[in-house]
Image: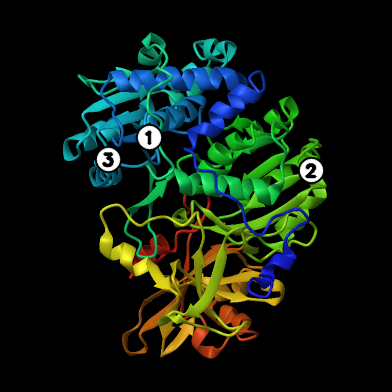
């Protein structure tokens, strides 16, 4: 077995090569936690505390409320919510009924919501007041027939909720950020009203099976067009169980920071399914805010922090400058973008804990690879495959042909967390799920190199590789070099049409503080140190900041469009 999976030697002591995936729905973990740890704090939202017993009872009442308004097994229910206690309750209530959660970013425009709602066929939407206007505007283009509106302030502690009505500017600003008036004549139901009026769902109401569809998670996948990834209960249960085996966190012992958005696959698994599976206390933040995280840390010390590199960088700096004790955070995991050794070192210095990098896709529920949770982790590397997960690195033009170790190739992943395809997109599904040697493999679209010990290093995404003059240019390689220039604070490299050379390399840069201009000749001289001539940027544009996703990932496709619009 070890010869087939050389990366097993990198596993931390006690981490199994394979796990038995429980044959159960995701909701069983919450019911079990409520039975085994009824008085343990499950959620802390801005100081408002919910125990596991209270959470499970609220889920049962919410499930009955949804049943009474017509939600049935297999129905798609859209959640358009920020992180809050209601989001957790609604997520598990929908699943308990055997219905399907469809997560959406609450900052989406009406057009973005309309596309996803129409594609999923959602018939019920549970929406934050602030997001209600765009959802209601999108509604005529969808099958949504019932809209349930959430007042986020109802999740706050009573004292904080009362303070919102004080006649002072700070209270007005906070209230305006959390609430919004509904469009005139809007026909909606109120979440807290219908849940309070409902009885508990009968205990004999049929439970979903592991094979039932649990979640449609929209992703650009490998083509850039948003599609719903089909994630069944067994996929989500598998990834939560893999995470528990990897971290070896005990049941009922951890306090997890939920600063990642629940509507993103990373936040959904680490903060909703994995955290509940280990009966952790989840400290819920409506959005990432350094002040709120450090205040919560002093109120309820965090032990495990899933996040993205900018979070760790900002928190480490703020904790050091303000003298806030963050030494309780023993473990942290970084994803979504490359983690620099400098950021990892700064975090580990201020916490005394371990920060490791992981890798995954929405299509893998989402975690597929991770660094060991020990000092053997390798900053700058994605890690090694999770338990019960295996990988191949292949020729992108022929996925049946593996490339030798140390050579670039496309990463393929196989395991119990790999999704079943894209909702109503069979051609896209066929393009990414391939059968090789009797196993189903996911083509990730990521170009990687496997190094000693089976550790994987990301090179780039296939769709973002720039082909210029017949040569492949890997944007991340160019970005890493240019980011070292003292005059440049940040950079994104993209390819745009370049006539007879195919594409030309363009660098969109953010100038370092105090710098007003960077000459193209200086950039060329810098890049000549380590880049082939064909990889040198042929054009520069200066941006005030790079466009990023909700979790901080640079959106190269948006940068590329900005470059094209400029021309």
Residue found farthest to the left: 140
Nearer-N-terminus badge (1/2): 1
Label 2: which secondary element: helix
Q: Residue at x 72, y 58 (%)?
A: 372
Q: Nearer the viewer, mark 1 or mark 2?
A: 1
Q: Nearer the viewer, mark 3 or mark 1?
A: 1
| Residue 358 in which image quadrant | bottom right
- The picture places residue 50, in percent across and down from the top left corner, at 59, 20
In the rendered image, the vertical position of residue 312 relative to residue 451, given as above or below: above
Residue hosting label 3:
110
| Residue 152 in which image quadrant | top left
Q: CA distance from mark 3 to mark 1?
A: 12 Å
Label 3: which secondary element: helix
Closer-to-camera residue (410/47): 410
Closer-to-camera residue (155/549): 155
Label 1: which secondary element: strand
Q: Residues within 10 Å of mark 2 (few under 14, many from 20)?
A: some
Q: CA distance from mark 1 to mark 2?
A: 36 Å
The answer to whether residue 181 of the structure is visible from this angle is no
- Locate the N terminus by quadrant: bottom right
Q: Which mark is residue 80?
A: 1
In this picture, residue 63 sits left or right of residue 335: left
Closer-to-camera residue (446/160): 446
In contact (CB < 8 Å): disc 1 and disc 2:
no
Nearer-N-terminus badge (3/2): 3
Residue hosting label 2:
320
Q: Which mark is residue 30?
A: none
């Amino acid at each position: 077995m070890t010869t087939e999976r050389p990366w097993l030697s990198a596993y931390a002591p006690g981490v199994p090569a394979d796990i038995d995936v429980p044959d159960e729905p995701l909701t069983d973990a919450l019911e079990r936690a409520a039975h085994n740890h009824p008085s343990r704090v499950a959620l802390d939202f801005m100081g408002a505390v919910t125990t596991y017993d209270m959470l499970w009872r609220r889920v049962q009442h919410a499930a009955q409320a949804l049943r009474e308004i017509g939600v049935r097994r297999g129905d798609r229910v859209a959640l358009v919510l920020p992180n809050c206690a209601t989001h957790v309750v609604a997520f598990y209530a929908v699943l308990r009924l055997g219905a399907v959660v469809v997560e959406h970013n609450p900052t989406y425009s009406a057009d973005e919501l309309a596309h996803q709602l129409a594609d999923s066929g959602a018939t019920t939407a549970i929406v934050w007041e602030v997001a209600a206007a765009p959802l209601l505007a999108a509604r005529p283009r969808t099958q949504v027939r019932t809209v349930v509106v959430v007042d986020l302030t109802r999740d706050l502690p009573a004292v904080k909720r009362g303070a919102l009505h004080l006649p002072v500017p700070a209270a007005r600003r906070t209230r305006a950020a959390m609430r919004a008036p509904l469009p005139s004549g809007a026909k909606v139901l109120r979440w807290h009203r219908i849940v309070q009026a409902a009885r508990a769902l009968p205990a004999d109401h049929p439970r979903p099976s592991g094979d039932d569809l649990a979640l449609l998670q929209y992703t650009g996948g490998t083509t850039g067009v948003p599609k719903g990834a089909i994630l069944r209960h067994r996929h989500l249960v598998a990834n939560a169980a893999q995470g528990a085996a990897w971290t070896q966190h005990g049941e009922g012992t951890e306090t997890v920071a939920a600063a990642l958005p629940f509507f993103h696959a990373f936040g959904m698994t680490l903060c909703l399914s994995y955290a509940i599976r280990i009966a952790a206390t989840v400290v819920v933040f409506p959005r990432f805010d350094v002040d709120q995280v450090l205040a919560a840390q002093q109120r309820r010390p965090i032990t495990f922090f899933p996040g993205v590199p900018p979070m760790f960088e900002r928190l480490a700096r703020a904790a050091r400058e303000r003298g806030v004790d963050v030494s309780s955070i023993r473990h942290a995991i970084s994803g979504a973008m490359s983690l620099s050794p400098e950021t990892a070192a700064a975090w580990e210095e201020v916490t005394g804990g371990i920060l490791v990098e992981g890798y995954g896709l929405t299509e893998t529920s989402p975690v597929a690879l991770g660094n060991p949770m020990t000092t053997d982790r390798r900053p700058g590397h994605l890690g090694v495959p999770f338990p019960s997960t295996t990988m191949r690195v292949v020729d992108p033009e022929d996925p049946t042909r593996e490339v030798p170790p140390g050579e670039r190739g496309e990463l393929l992943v196989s395991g119990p967390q790999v999704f079943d395809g894209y909702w109503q997109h069979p051609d896209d599904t066929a393009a990414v799920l391939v059968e090789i040697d009797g196993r189903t493999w996911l083509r990730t679209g990521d170009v990687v190199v496997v190094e000693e010990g089976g550790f994987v290093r990301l090179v780039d995404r296939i769709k973002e590789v720039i082909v210029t003059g017949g040569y492949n240019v890997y944007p991340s390689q160019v970005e890493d070099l240019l980011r070292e220039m003292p005059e440049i604070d940040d950079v994104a490299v993209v390819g745009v049409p370049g006539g007879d050379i195919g594409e030309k390399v363009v660098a969109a840069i953010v100038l370092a503080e105090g710098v007003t201009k960077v000459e193209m000749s200086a950039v060329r001289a810098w890049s000549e140190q380590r880049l082939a001539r064909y990889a040198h940027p042929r054009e520069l544009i200066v941006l005030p900041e790079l466009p990023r996703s909700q979790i901080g990932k640079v959106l190269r496709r948006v940068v590329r469009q900005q470059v094209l619009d400029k021309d």
